[in-house]
Image (cartoon, rainbow, N blue to C red):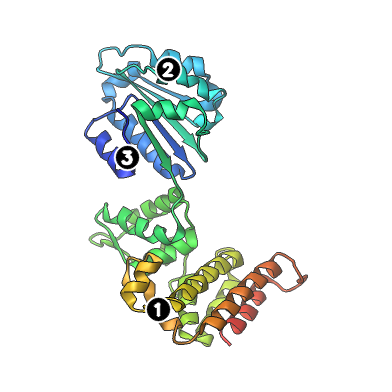
Amino acid sequence: MAKDLNFNEIKRDIQSKQFMPVYLFQGEESYYIDQLTDRLIESVLDEAERDFNQTIVYGLETDVATIINACRRYPMMSERQLVVVKEAQLLKNIDDLTAYVKNPLQSTVLVINYKYGKLDGRKKLTGEIAKSGIVFESKKLYDNKIPDFIIQYLRDKQIEIQWPTAQILTDYLGNDLSKITHELEKLSITLPAGQKQITPALIEQNIGISKEFNNYELQKAIAAGDIVRANRIARYFEENQKNNPFILTLILLFGFFSNLMICQYEKDKSKGHLMAVLGFKWDMQIVDYLEAMKRYNPWKTMENISLIREYDARSKGFQNSSVPPGKLLMELLYKLMH
């Protein structure tokens, strides 16, 4: 009977060696797909069993007939065998696997690793896998969920990080979980003996993100109406454009003022209610919005959203042929805060 499980539930079952005959891992976020695939490779077979009972193929280099033949073999001196199809999105005529999936061998664990998209739900293959195995869609995390991911990832390693520090990493690294976890592993290795917390100073030393001049600090300055501080950050961005792209700052400012407008039109403006509306988990996430509501009325917030759109267009050449990104940011900040 098919199961409908999330990432943690699938991981738990794999760890307890409760295997299904077929797994389809698909979606835009490759991190979770690779994590579950690697867990199965580590867990289905002991190291001594892998030489004769593990087959790993790549979609571009194989075909459906080869995969089905591998799946229909019986294991040698083992309870089961493992067949993994990586980069399955490149496999031609993948729906022809339906012939096997309709009646899979119970001694075979077939893993279909399908990245950067989903199988066409109208085709038979997905439905047949859902009947006897697991279909898991790995979705991209929304940007506002990335700090929580960072906090939990490090907590699983018995390492702490404060939410503002996680947000600084998010602003710099984006929402590519594989890239984020790679940087977190590097930071974990560089922790001094006995230290169990990732700090802004450690990040600045090892990744190059300034603990004083970043988009999180810029948001705080705008929320507080601190023009001097905001301009100082903007000048730093101008001198370090490679690590502080203008488009990223615009995206974050647009998100901030969009959320601010939501707060302004809520009847209940208590901290707890606004956190619930915005989906915030940490008290530090709402502080800038509570501060900004003292300085920006709804009309000014709407004007600021329009200004950010205008400067996004200008940064792409619309009605602007010569003003560089650093100067555009200085102009924009002046207008946002006046």
- Which residue is more in the foreground, 317 or 190? 317
Tell me what residue is drawn at x 43 percent, y 50 percent: 177
Residue at the (24%, 55%) spot, across then down: 158
Q: Which quadrant would residue 39 be assigned to in this image?
A: top left
| Side of 94 where 44 appears, left or right | left
Instruction: Name the residue that disc number 1 marks.
Output: 267
Q: Quote the CA–CA distance across marks 1 and 2.
A: 57 Å
First of labels 3, 1 by sequence position = 3
Residue 162 pos. (x, y %): 32, 67
The residue that label 3 is drawn on is 5
The structure residue drawn at horizontal position 54% and vertical position 79%, both measured from the top left corner, is 301
Tag in front: 1 or 2? 1
Q: Residues within 10 Å of mark 3 (few under 14, many from 20)?
A: some
| Residue 159 vs residue 121, the one in the foreground | 121
Residue 167, relative to residue 101: is it above or below? Answer: below
* 336 is higher (above) or lower (below) than 325: below
In front: label 3 or label 1: 1
Q: Earlier in the sequence, mark 1 or mark 2?
A: 2
Graded by Cα atoms within 10 Å as few (under 14), some (14 to 19) or many (20 or more), the crowding at tag 1 reads few
Give the residue type at disc 3: Leu
Quarter of the image for the C terminus: give it: bottom right
Q: Position of residue 305 (x, y in %)?
A: 58, 74
Q: Mark 2 falls on what kind of element? A: helix
Could you say which disc has been placed on residue 100 in the image? 2
Where residue 66 appears, as percent x and y from the top left, is 48, 15
**220 left or right of 309?**
left
- For badge 2, the amino acid type reads Tyr
Q: Amino acid at mark 1?
A: Lys
Name the residue located 45 percent from the left edge and 56 percent from the top edge. 142
Q: CA distance from mark 3 to mark 1?
A: 38 Å
